[in-house]
Image (cartoon, rainbow, N blue to C red):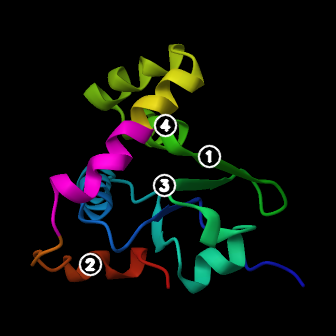
Amino acid sequence: MSRPRIPSGILFYDADCAFCRGWVRFVLRHDKPGRWRFAPLHGATARAQLKAPSDFQTVVLLEASDAHSPRYFVRSEAVLRVLEQLGGVWRLISWVRVLPVGWRDAGYAAIAARRQRWLRRGAEPPLPPAEAGRFLP
């Protein structure tokens, strides 16, 4: 079974998490070239593209340099790769990558463990209609 063509990048996120949805809005706001698409971790696109999407409780970035060799990044590496590509001050923050991945992921895990308490699910402004095409099922 062949996989469908992958956009230049897909950012998979927990659609039930207000913190994660806020991250997606942040990326939408700052990703002027529109290089990423977005898909919920437990949606059809994740089932088609990720090996075991139900096991993921984190942000997953799928980059495709070509259709035959997609590259997957999770946790802090996914976030830092996105920040780097956003450019500007966000690129400076991505220099946190010089820290060992274990330390970065421990910080990521600490934030992830508290995310539901920090931001409750609630009414959010609708996405701009122009951005609807960037969301995958």
How far, Cα to Cα, is label 3 from label 1?
Answer: 8 Å
Q: Which residue is drawn at 19% across and 56% down?
A: 117
Label annotation for residue 59: 3
Residue 12 lies, in percent from the top left, at: 50, 64
**113 vs 108: above or below:** below
The residue segment tinted magenta is: 109-120
Question: Which residue is under mark 1?
Answer: 73
Which circle's residue, 2 or 1, is located before the other in the chain? 1
Residue 110 lies, in percent from the top left, at: 37, 37
Left/right placement of residue 119 relative to residue 30 reads: left
- What amino acid type should be assigned to the residue bearing mark 1? Phe
How far, Cα to Cα, is label 1 from label 4?
Answer: 8 Å
How far, Cα to Cα, is label 4 from label 2?
Answer: 29 Å
Q: How crowded is mark 1: few (under 14 residues within 10 Å), some or many (20 or more)?
A: some
Which circle's residue, 2 or 3, is located before the other in the chain? 3
Left/right placement of residue 130 relative to residue 58 reads: left
Residue 64 at least partly seen: yes
> Of helix, strand and loop, which one carries label 1?
strand
Residue 6 at least partly seen: no
Q: Quick one: 29 or 94, which is closer to the camera?
A: 94
Residue 17 lies, in percent from the top left, at: 31, 66
Q: Residue at x 86, y 80 (%)?
A: 2
* Residues at discs 4 and 2 in contact (Cβ within 8 Å): no
- What amino acid type should be assigned to the residue bearing mark 2? Ala
Question: Which residue is under mark 4?
Answer: 76
Asked whether 131 falls inside the magenta stretch, the response is no
Label annotation for residue 130: 2
**116 vs 107: above or below:** below
* Residues at discs 3 and 1 in contact (Cβ within 8 Å): no
How far, Cα to Cα, is label 3 from label 4?
Answer: 9 Å
